[in-house]
Every structure is written in C-alpha cells, then in structure tokens.
Image (tube, rainbow, N blue to C red):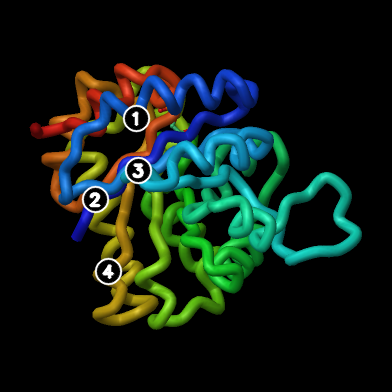
Amino acid sequence: MRRLVLGNWKMNRTVSQSIALVRSLLPLLPRSADREVAIAPPFTALAGVAPLLKGSAVGLAAQDLFWEDEGPYTGEISGLMLQDAGVTYVLVAHSERRRHLEETDRVAALKVRAALRCGLKPILCVGEDETERAAGRARDVVRAQMARALEGSVPGETPHLQIAYEPVWAIGSGRAATPSQVAEMHDLIRAELRGLYGETGSVVRVLYGGSVTAENVDELMRTPGVDGLLVGGAALHAGQFARIVSYGL
Ligand code: PGA
C-alpha cells in the first residue's frame, strides 16, 4: 500500500503566501514511489495553488466540504466545486470542526457520502479527547465515530476512503501519541474496517495525526498499522514538511 502524507494548513496562509509556500516546498520533496504527498491549503488558495501542483507529485486536498452539491447554502463549498478546482482529497469531521462548529457524526456521514458522490477521496477524522482516554473509553469512542460516519458506504467505495486517527489531545499539543497507543488504535480501526467491509476493508489507508514532527516521524512510520500521516503545524514550514515526507530515506 502506498503511504500518504497530507499537510493540513488549517486557517493559515493567504493566497500569495500559499503560492510562495508551495514554490519553496516543491523542490525540497523527495521523489519516492512508495509515498504519496498532498497539501490542504484554505479554500481561498485552492485555485491559485492547483496550477503549481499540476505535473508535480503533490496532490491537492480541501479541509472540508458541504453535503449538498449546489443550492441555497450561504457560505458553503460543495464537493463539485472542489473537484472542479482540482482537489483530490477532502478532510471530513476534523476534530477542530467537531469542537468549534459542532459537527456531528451524522454530518460526517453526509459529507463522506457527498465526497464519494463527487469523485473526491474523503479522509474521515476520528479520535478521542483527553477525558475519554482517561476514562478508558478511547476504543468505544472511535468505534462509534466510525460506525456512524461510515453508515451507508459500501465495500466498492473502500479504494477511495481513508481514516485519520487523530487523538484530540495530541493535536497541536506537542504531545504525539506513543507508538503503542497508535498501534493499538490503528489495529482497532483496521478491525472495524474489516467488520464493515469484509476483506476490501484492508485497502483503506489509516493515517495518524497529532503533533507529527521531523523528530518523531521515523518512529511513527515504523509503527505497525500506520499507512500515512496527517500533519498540521509542521506542514506550514517547507523544510519541516519536506523532512517529514522524507522519512526513512
Ligand atoms: P498538528 O495537527 O500536527 O499541528 O498536531 C494535526 C491535525 O490537526 O491534523
């Protein structure tokens, strides 16, 4: 399975800053067939960045989408619009959206459906918060998030689907999950995928996200069950992101 490293820029960088970041990033990236790279700039920068990525090995991702394809939904962006702007991947239900915008698993399910319908590859984000982990509920939380958000998807869609395990307490905290925590949760996610889709569940990539840095990337990528990474803060610096993408080389 080809691994995927995706840089989530969150609500950072203007259009001109995004173009500058891509220009400095592209020459630093390794050419290695065993890994795929994508970046998720803010919506406003997608169309500006897309032509720079054409012909490069870097894919374009969006950070969110709406569940309808067009209509009276002021302020929203649809999967069709993203597809037209050159987007391949789209994050769904990142924990920052769950927290600040009250996105639920039901909304996540609608967005997964919309992404697949529009020919995009959804990356469903799941993960427990600190209180849930302390209460020993991490496994139950992630299982429930997956079951609800993947409702209605079928085995034939698995080649387009990825899951990102992002423990909320590890995001932006400088406190990445330990390899044993990551291995345990990825194993659980894989088991859930097999339960939902049978053998075809094994083609879904399971990414880890939360305080990934150039320092911990090698250990994380050696951890069993890790098929890629979702990188936040470190993705905003061309040198750091390029070093992360160069893991193991
Ligand atoms: P971080 O963010 O790398 O800054 O912890 C990860 C994410 O939110 O995807």
Q: Is mark 3 within 8 Å of ligand 1?
A: no
Q: Is mark 4 within 8 Å of ligand 1?
A: no
**First along the sequence among labels 3 and 1:** 1
Circles 2 and 3, Cβ within 8 Å, touching? The answer is no
Residue 227 in percent (x, y) is at 24, 51
Residue in the picture at 27% in, 46% down: 228
Q: Which residue extends farthest left?
A: 249
In the image, what residue type sits under mark 4? Answer: Val
Label 4 or label 1, whichever lies nearer to me, is 1
**First along the sequence among labels 3 and 4:** 3
**First along the sequence among labels 4 and 1:** 1
Q: Is 129 rendered above or below residue 71?
A: above
Task: Calculate the distance from the C-alpha at mark 3 to the C-alpha at mark 1.
Answer: 8 Å
**First along the sequence among labels 2 and 1:** 2
Q: Which residue extends farthest right?
A: 72
Residue 246 in percent (x, y) is at 18, 31
Quadrant for ligand 1 reads top left
* Mark number, residue 120: none
In the image, what residue type sits under mark 3? Answer: Ser
The residue under label 3 is: 56
The residue under label 4 is: 203
Task: Calculate the distance from the C-alpha at mark 2 to the C-alpha at mark 3.
Answer: 17 Å
Find numbered disc 2 in the image and state the secondary structure of the residue it sits on.
strand
